[in-house]
């Protein structure tokens, strides 16, 4: 084994060759891809610290003074809208000792460090620091919350920790081409579901694109009204994908409780699509709503999942809408709980020496593409070696 292979926590290209093979000959990835702390750290550095990341909806910080403090891949971030209406993202760390200056979400005029009282405006500029003028070399203008890149796409917030990341418009270009017609910007946030899973973050997204299991595990929930063909799967060069198929709305009985989204009136009730924007943004489009689903890594064996339900603005004015929202929420949780047992069971197997990856099914085309795109990002030196062979 090479020194590089040892430091990466895996056995080099040979160990991954079976996964990198064409689908009909491929096997699932070795357990280390999901359980190794070294590989996990590589993922954070090569993917999450480089790409644009979904951070929520614009309406979560709709008014001047609105803010939300979030933590993404261990990075504390605060997103806020200033009094002029401009959005800002900053590292949520006081420039004095690193203490978080914002917690939760709400509306405020400024952020004040609870430790020594340094005050920042909503753009992150330091506006007050008691007893610091007497300190030689203190420059208030340079002591601000460190900015984080922020941009929006059709009502969705994205941030990037990489100052050199390509523009968001380029990053989402394929996504825009395939899914702009869903009217994201004409929707509002209805439900926001947050929970933790004892599994690697990739298992959550793999499960969402694994249509092989739908007719088995979800036979009593939505599996019976689910139909697709291999031709419906469109693989993207960046590891993303688009899938168009047939499935009912995400409700008990697969009925559109709120009717069709107005701009999809021409579609059948069974209209359905799924998209993946790497590294960790998967969504489901249905005739009545859009559901972004994000898995945030919390370590090799744990992740935090956020699920958003977006509905057309006009739906919110309908009588009984709040009660209908609860139906969507409870059904979503019930389906996810069906998946939880399976993906957490897979995770427990990943660290066992006895685990041996099985062959992939031809129904796992999307999953094969996703897994291999992640491997290529984690181990670029092996990709270069393969290309040279």
Image (cartoon, helix red, strand yellow):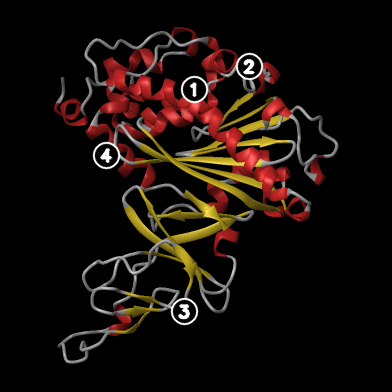
Q: Residue at x 53, y 21 (%)?
A: 210
Task: Estimate the spatial distance between the alpha carbons at disc 3 and disc 4, rounded to whole Å.
Answer: 37 Å
Task: Estimate the spatial distance between the alpha carbons at disc 4 and disc 2, rounded to whole Å.
Answer: 34 Å
Task: Estimate the spatial distance between the alpha carbons at disc 2 and disc 3, rounded to whole Å.
Answer: 53 Å
Q: In the rendered structure, are the residues bearing label 3 and label 1 in contact, judged by CB atoms less than 8 Å apart?
A: no
- Residue 174, relative to residue 343: is it above or below? below
Number of callouts: 4
Disc nearer the start of the sequence (4/2): 4
The image shows residue 389 at horizontal and vertical percentages of 33, 19
| SS for callout 4 | helix
Which of discs 3 and 1 lies nearer the camera? The answer is: 3
| SS for callout 3 | loop
Q: Residue 230 carries which label?
A: 2
Q: Which mark is residue 279?
A: none
- Residue 122, relative to residue 298: is it above or below? below
From this viewpoint, which residue is outermost toward the right? 266
Disc nearer the start of the sequence (3/1): 3
Which residue bears the numbered disc 1?
367
The image shows residue 215 at horizontal and vertical percentages of 60, 14
For the residue carrying disc 3, how many other residues have a C-alpha within 10 Å: few (<14), some (14-19), or many (20+)? some
Task: Estimate the spatial distance between the alpha carbons at disc 3 and disc 1, rounded to whole Å.
Answer: 46 Å
Task: Estimate the spatial distance between the alpha carbons at disc 2 and disc 1, rounded to whole Å.
Answer: 12 Å
Task: Estimate the spatial distance between the alpha carbons at disc 4 and disc 1, rounded to whole Å.
Answer: 22 Å
Residue 90 falls left or right of residue 256? left
Q: In the image shown, does 197 or 155 lie closer to the viewer?
A: 197
Task: Tell me where residue 70 sits by quadrant.
Answer: bottom left
Q: Residue 41 carries which label?
A: 4
- Residue 360, relative to residue 343: is it above or below? above
Which of discs 2 and 3 lies nearer the camera? The answer is: 3
- Residue 385, relative to residue 147: is it above or below? above
| SS for callout 1 | helix
């Amino acid at each position: 084994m090479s020194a590089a292979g040892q430091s990466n926590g895996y056995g080099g290209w040979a160990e991954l060759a079976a996964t990198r093979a064409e689908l009909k000959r491929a096997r699932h990835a070795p357990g280390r891809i999901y359980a190794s702390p070294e590989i996990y750290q590589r993922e954070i550095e090569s993917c999450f610290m480089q790409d644009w990341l979904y951070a929520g909806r614009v309406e979560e910080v709709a008014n001047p003074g609105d803010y939300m403090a979030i933590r993404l891949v261990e990075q504390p971030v605060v997103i806020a809208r200033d009094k002029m209406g401009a959005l800002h993202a900053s590292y949520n760390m006081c420039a004095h000792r690193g203490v978080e200056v914002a917690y939760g979400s709400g509306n405020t005029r400024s952020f004040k460090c609870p430790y020594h009282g340094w005050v920042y405006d909503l753009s992150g500029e330091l506006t007050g620091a008691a007893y610091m003028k007497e300190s030689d070399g203190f420059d208030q203008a340079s002591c601000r919350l460190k900015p984080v890149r922020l941009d929006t796409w059709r009502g969705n917030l994205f941030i990037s920790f990489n100052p050199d990341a390509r523009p968001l418009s380029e990053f989402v270009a394929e996504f825009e081409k395939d899914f702009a017609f869903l009217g994201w910007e004409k929707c509002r946030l209805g439900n926001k579901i947050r929970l933790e899973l004892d599994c690697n973050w990739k298992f959550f997204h793999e499960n969402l694109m694994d249509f092989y299991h739908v007719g088995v595990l979800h036979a009593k929930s939505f599996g019976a009204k689910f139909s697709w063909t291999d031709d419906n799967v469109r693989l993207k060069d960046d590891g993303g994908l688009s899938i168009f198929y047939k499935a009912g709305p995400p409700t008990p009985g697969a009925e559109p409780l709120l009717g069709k989204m107005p701009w999809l009136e021409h579609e059948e009730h069974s209209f359905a699509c799924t998209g993946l924007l790497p590294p960790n943004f998967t969504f489901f489009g249905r005739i009545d709503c859009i559901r972004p689903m994000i898995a945030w890594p919390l370590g090799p064996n744990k992740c935090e999942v956020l699920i958003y339900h977006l509905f057309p603005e006009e739906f919110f004015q309908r009588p009984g809408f709040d009660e209908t929202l609860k139906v969507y929420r409870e059904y979503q949780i019930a389906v996810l709980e069906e998946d939880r047992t399976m993906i957490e069971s897979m995770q427990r197997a990943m660290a066992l020496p006895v685990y041996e990856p099985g062959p992939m099914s031809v129904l796992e085309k999307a999953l094969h593409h996703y897994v291999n795109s992640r491997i290529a990002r984690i181990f670029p030196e092996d990709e270069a070696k393969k290309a040279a062979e």
